[in-house]
């Protein structure tokens, strides 16, 4: 696909999937709230709405279409556009939408009328993650209602939902520079906020998006993916959780050769979940650098590719569960855990379920981090790459069963014709399989 064709394709996806309201011919939509990216802080992605189902879906009609201000930006030849990953929020009868170019819009859901927009002009800085945004976060107190969201220029904004303007009491006239306050300087061309924060007990917890290192060795001092908590009222940085533990911190001994001093990433690029009753936030932490080679970072490498539970008020670690030891395959968690209350053998459990790229679903007690069903450490084949020291075992959940293929065997290959089968077998011989 040519650059022009790809831009056109992505631009159409970005525009046509935004805030399109469909209603039944025979009735009006019953108003319900959707105040979080994934419905609620527990990431349930559930709504009790039942008006639309399989019996009437075919009768839906489009009654309005809102075209955000991104349209003119995306049409520029020098502008790279990514896909629309955001989900509009529904709060007090108004839709709030964060566009791929970080333009925040308020829209009347009954008419599609634009109520206000806020454009931080982050798209003018083309060096960063321009064109990527996975959503926004809502928070309210007794006297405030705010939208929090991050930008491709490393800023966290607090926007008054009544006026569409930055909150002057938050940070520096309504925003915080997330490039400050970390243990070392960041490479701003590789750093941004691409997913919504999560707010728990008046603390805004923020992750980051950091460009993966696949094609070359990482910089000597890689950008840290540390997670931070900010006071929702003032923007003051309350705490920082260093995802690559530094000297004296728990987990530091899982980084041999003093690799903790230079390695970074291990960021939270996905959304997060929170349990306000417990006061806990849950961080699906991604891969460290380099994503596919760890010869210079021997050890298990906590907290890379780890689900971490923190106290929202202090950032103190409550528990952690590492999904991949010494990651080599970029199998970082791609989604927030879903917090669910279940019953197993008559016992009520406050649980969470985290799906993964390797088609496992990890089910843990969200208060303790203990597996609900056994997760077994199995010996695994070792890497043959010179200098690599892969981990001898990896965790395999016993329940639920994997939801996709595990490994590849000769019987899995195509056999449409003898010639294709022969070619497939020849290709398979080039790889270690199982």
Image (tube, rainbow, N blue to C red):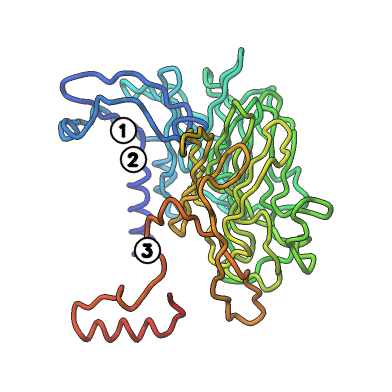
Q: Secondary structure at mark 1?
A: strand
Q: Secondary structure at mark 2?
A: loop
Residue farthest to the right?
Answer: 248
Q: Which residue is mark 3?
A: 405
Residue situated in front as seen by the camera: 44 or 121: 44
Write down the quadrant of residue 89 in the picture: top left
Disc sitting over residue 376 in the figure: none
Residue situated in front as seen by the camera: 295 or 432: 432
Q: Which residue is mark 2?
A: 17
What residue lies at 73% left-to-right and 61% top-to-bottom?
Answer: 254
Q: Residues within 10 Å of mark 1 (few under 14, many from 20)?
A: some
Find out whether the residues at labels 1 and 2 contact each other: C-beta distance under 8 Å: yes
Q: Residues within 10 Å of mark 2 (few under 14, many from 20)?
A: some
Relative to 133, 218 lies left or right: right
Gap between marks 2 and 3 measured at Cα: 31 Å
Residue situated in front as seen by the camera: 53 or 17: 53
Q: Position of residue 249 (x, y in %)?
A: 80, 50
Front disc: 2 or 3: 3
What residue lies at 52% left-to-right and 38% top-to-bottom?
Answer: 351
Residue farthest to the top?
Answer: 142
Q: Evaluate whether residue 212 shows in this view.
A: yes
Q: Which residue is mark 1?
A: 20
């Amino acid at each position: 696909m040519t650059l022009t064709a790809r831009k056109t394709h992505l631009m159409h996806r970005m525009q046509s999937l935004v805030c399109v309201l469909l209603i039944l011919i025979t009735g009006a939509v019953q108003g319900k709230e959707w105040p979080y990216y994934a419905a609620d802080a527990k990431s349930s992605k559930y709504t009790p709405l039942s008006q639309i189902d399989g019996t009437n879906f075919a009768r839906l009609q489009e009654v309005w279409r809102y075209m955000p201000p991104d349209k003119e930006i995306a049409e520029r030849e020098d502008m790279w556009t990514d896909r629309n990953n955001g989900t509009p929020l529904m709060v007090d009868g108004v839709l709030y939408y964060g566009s791929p170019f970080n333009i925040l819009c308020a829209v009347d859901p009954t008419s599609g009328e634009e109520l206000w927009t806020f454009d931080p002009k982050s798209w003018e800085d083309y060096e960063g993650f321009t064109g990527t945004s996975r959503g926004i976060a809502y928070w309210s107190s007794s006297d405030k209602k705010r939208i929090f969201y991050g930008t491709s220029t490393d800023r966290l904004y607090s926007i008054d939902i009544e006026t569409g303007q930055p909150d002057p009491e938050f940070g520096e006239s309504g925003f915080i520079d997330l490039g400050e306050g970390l243990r070392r300087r960041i490479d701003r061309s590789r750093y941004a906020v691409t997913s919504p924060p999560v707010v728990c007990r008046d603390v805004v917890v923020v992750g980051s998006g950091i460009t993966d290192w696949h094609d070359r060795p990482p910089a000597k001092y890689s950008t840290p993916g540390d997670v931070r908590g900010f006071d929702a009222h003032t923007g003051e940085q309350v705490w920082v959780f260093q995802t690559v533990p530094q000297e004296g911190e728990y987990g530091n001994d899982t980084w041999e050769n003093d690799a903790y001093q230079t390695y970074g990433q291990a960021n939270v690029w996905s959304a997060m979940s929170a349990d306000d009753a417990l006061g806990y936030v849950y961080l699906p932490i991604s891969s460290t650098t380099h994503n596919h080679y760890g010869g210079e970072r021997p050890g298990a490498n906590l907290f890379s590719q780890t689900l971490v539970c923190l106290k929202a008020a202090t950032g103190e670690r409550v528990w952690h569960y590492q999904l991949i030891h010494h990651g080599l395959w970029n199998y970082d968690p791609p989604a927030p855990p879903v917090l669910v209350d279940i019953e197993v053998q008559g016992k009520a459990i406050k649980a969470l379920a985290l799906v993964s790229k390797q088609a496992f679903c990890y089910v843990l007690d969200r208060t303790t981090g203990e597996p609900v069903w056994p997760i077994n450490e199995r010996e695994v084949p070792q890497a043959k790459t010179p200098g690599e020291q892969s981990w001898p075992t990896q965790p395999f959940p016993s329940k639920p069963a994997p939801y996709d293929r595990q490994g590849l065997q000769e019987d899995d290959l195509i056999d449409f014709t003898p010639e294709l089968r022969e070619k497939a077998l020849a290709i398979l011989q080039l790889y270690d399989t199982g």
